[in-house]
Amino acid sequence: MLHLKLPTEPQWVEMVERGNLEEILTDHAYCEQKAASSCISIIQSYPDFEKVVEVLTPVVIEEWQHFARVHAELKKRGLKLGMQRKDAYVNELLKWKRKGASRKESLIDKLLICALIEARSCERFKLLWQGLKDEELKSFYYDLMVSEAGHYVNFIELAREIGGRAQVDKRWQELLYYEIDVLQKIPPTHNKIH
């Protein structure tokens, strides 16, 4: 369903389990917050695209609820929300956006980048659900995996509706191949949840 070109190595789950849980959950919390912020930014930039407002408003709410859930998970475990880190993965993906693009092309690129981030998160949440030993965290990541899959579909379908399926699917393939280079540039320790 996700069609990612470079799957995350299964050993990534072991790296997460051996890592600092407070740092991993903090990273995850900020990923959810940034997802909500990205949707808000798109809505603010493209309010004249009614479907954008209609589709992304519920996503904003869900992503903020995810932030709250991750924060609650931190508190439940006696951990604290740490400082936000630079997101090398997202920063590299943003370089893919077309320079001098039309407003509509720019919107499509933003939607596709959001779709890819959601797809990658979904893929990694699935690995966590399948591979973690902590049963509570497994259940937690299962719920989030299902939600992120829905967001991925929302973004990609919205882009197709705005730009046409054939053109958007061609652009989507370009982004999927671009992501391979992005993932190979970033050390796994800087590439936790997505």
Image (cartoon, helix red, strand yellow):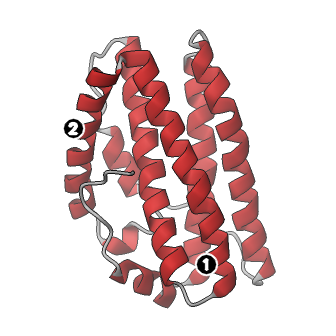
Q: Residue furthest front?
A: 1
Quarter where residue 133 is shown: bottom right
Q: Residues within 10 Å of mark 2 (few under 14, many from 20)?
A: few
| Numbered disc in front, either 1 or 2 | 1
Q: CA distance from mark 1 to mark 2?
A: 33 Å
Q: Earlier in the sequence, mark 1 or mark 2?
A: 1
Residue 141 sits above or below residue 101 on the image? below
Quarter where residue 83 is shown: bottom right
Q: Which mark is residue 138?
A: 1
Q: Number of numbered discs present?
A: 2
Disc 2, SS = helix
Q: Are marks 1 and 2 in contact (CB under 8 Å)?
A: no
Counting from the top left corner in percent of width and height, residue 168 is at 32, 26
Disc 1, SS = helix
Residue 156 sits above or below residue 116 on the image? above
Q: Seen in the image, is 139 located left or right of residue 172?
A: right
Residue 64 sits above or below residue 7 on the image? above
Counting from the top left corner in percent of width and height, residue 48 is at 59, 9
Counting from the top left corner in percent of width and height, residue 39 is at 59, 34
Q: Residues within 10 Å of mark 1 (few under 14, many from 20)?
A: some
Q: Seen in the image, is 167 located left or right of residue 139?
A: left
Which amino acid is tagged 2? Answer: Glu
Q: Which mark is residue 174?
A: 2
Report the residue at 72% width, 80% height from top: 79
Q: Seen in the image, is 194 located left or right of residue 26?
A: left
